[in-house]
Image: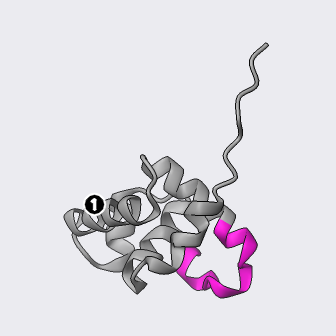
Amino acid sequence: MTHVPVPNWSRELERVPLLSAREAETFALLGAGWSNRRISARLQVTERTVKAHVARILAKLQVESRLQAGLVAQIYRRMYEGTVSREMVAG
């Protein structure tokens, strides 16, 4: 039986402060499982703009997918519950 290492995401979590305000909003919504279309409607930007935000988030966090970014966002939210606006991820 092979042991598969479980990522702890600590390096990625350390990079979260590198996100711009708009990227941080997108990051939080990714963590809530929102689609690009829904994020674009919420932030009142085009889906193309959301895709650009997501691409920058992936690059800044040095993760490979929006799923990984979403997992990091969920962990970040749980670690720093009071610093992420509940209004932003609700609705």
The magenta-colored residue range is 76-91
Query: Relative to the observer, which residue lies in front, 91 or 33?
Result: 33
Residue 42 showing in the rendered view: yes
Give me the residue at 59% from left, 62% from top: 11
Where is the N terminus found, in terms of image quarters?
Answer: top right
Query: Residue 29: x percent and y percent?
Result: 50, 68
Query: Residue 19: x percent and y percent?
Result: 43, 77
Q: Residue furthest right?
A: 1
Query: Residue 17: x percent and y percent?
Result: 51, 80
Give me the residue at 39% from left, 58% from top: 58
Q: Residues within 10 Å of mark 1 (few under 14, many from 20)?
A: some
Disc 1 target residue: 51
Vertically, is 34 above or below 45?
A: above
Q: Is residue 27 left or right of residue 80?
A: left
Secondary structure, mark 1, is: helix
* Residue 43 falls in image quadrant: bottom left
Query: Relative to the observer, which residue lies in front, 25 or 10?
Result: 10
Give me the residue at 74% from left, 18% from top: 2
